[in-house]
Image: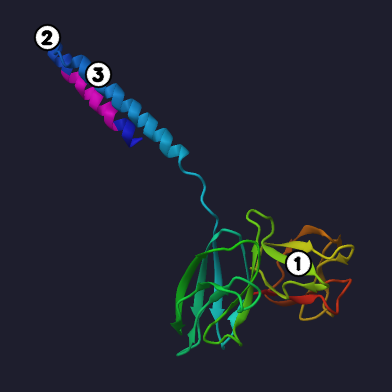
Amino acid sequence: MIALLVPVNVLIGAALVAYGARVRRRPVSFPLLISAGLVVIGAGVVALNLTSTASPAGPTGVTVSLVAQNTAFQPTTLTFPAGAHVTVNFDNKDAQTTHNFVLFGGPDASSAALFTGTIITGPATTQYTFTAPGPGTYFFHCEVHPQQMTGTVTVTAAGSPGGLALTAKNLVFSQTSLTAAAGGQVTIHFVNDDPQTPHNFVLFAGADASGPPLFTGETVTGPGSTNYTFAAPPSGTHFFYCQFHPSTMHGTLTVP
């Protein structure tokens, strides 16, 4: 808009000057001033159009929180979409203890490191930023305490529905620990990769299946997928399982 307002003001000013001189005689330069002003306005319009068409939407921005306390990560599972600009708000609560976050390109530390965060001494906070890899499950740890402090990252397909991801394969869940925010709705994008095998997701109040069920998801026979959406349970740790294979397929949903 500035590019248009400036030449308009110039054109109006030039016209007024020329009009004032018209009583005496019209200057020879009057037509040139009008033409120059029109040319500048045209250039401004072109520039404005170029600016508006050259601003495509960028990658998704995702912010997650990760706490290091008592030589353990909380949470131990993170989820974000492929290609997203990820910011990890890292909080080291262990005084006089060093921690960091290292993301690997596979299910364990034998894969190449995709990102290595700066080591910080607690209590302290920092931000780690990187671009999410392609869809899949990835391993992370603290390089100072690689045995005690580990976790997994689930990267979903860009634009895929579902705030959390859970896959059933070989009669086990890909994630045995999920974390959801308190209040509002929880959505789990559930994938069954076991052909001709039924699976589902059942959430209980409390640490085991003795508590009352809070949500029972529809059965999905593999290969297939669905979205489970339900009200976030109260703060605490809640048990979930597949009702068809409860002894091998189970985990916990933590609500801070």
The percent coordinates of residue 51 (x first, y second) are: 41, 39
Residue 90 is labelled as none
Mark 2: secondary structure: loop
Q: Quadrant of the N terminus?
A: top left
Horizontal arrangement in the rendering, residue 30 relative to residue 213 (left or right):
left
Q: Nearer the viewer, mark 2 or mark 3?
A: 3
Q: Residue at x 46, y 71 (%)?
A: 127
Q: Nearer the viewer, residue 209 or 138?
A: 138
Q: Which residue is mark 2?
A: 25
Q: Which tag, 3 or 1, sits closer to the chain's start?
A: 3
Q: Nearer the viewer, mark 2 or mark 1?
A: 1
Q: Nearer the viewer, residue 45 or 196?
A: 196
Membership of 23 in magenta stretch = no
Q: Amino acid at mark 2?
A: Arg
Membership of 15 in magenta stretch = yes
Mark 3: secondary structure: helix
Residue 213 visible, this angle: yes
Q: Which tag, 2 or 3, sits closer to the chain's start?
A: 2
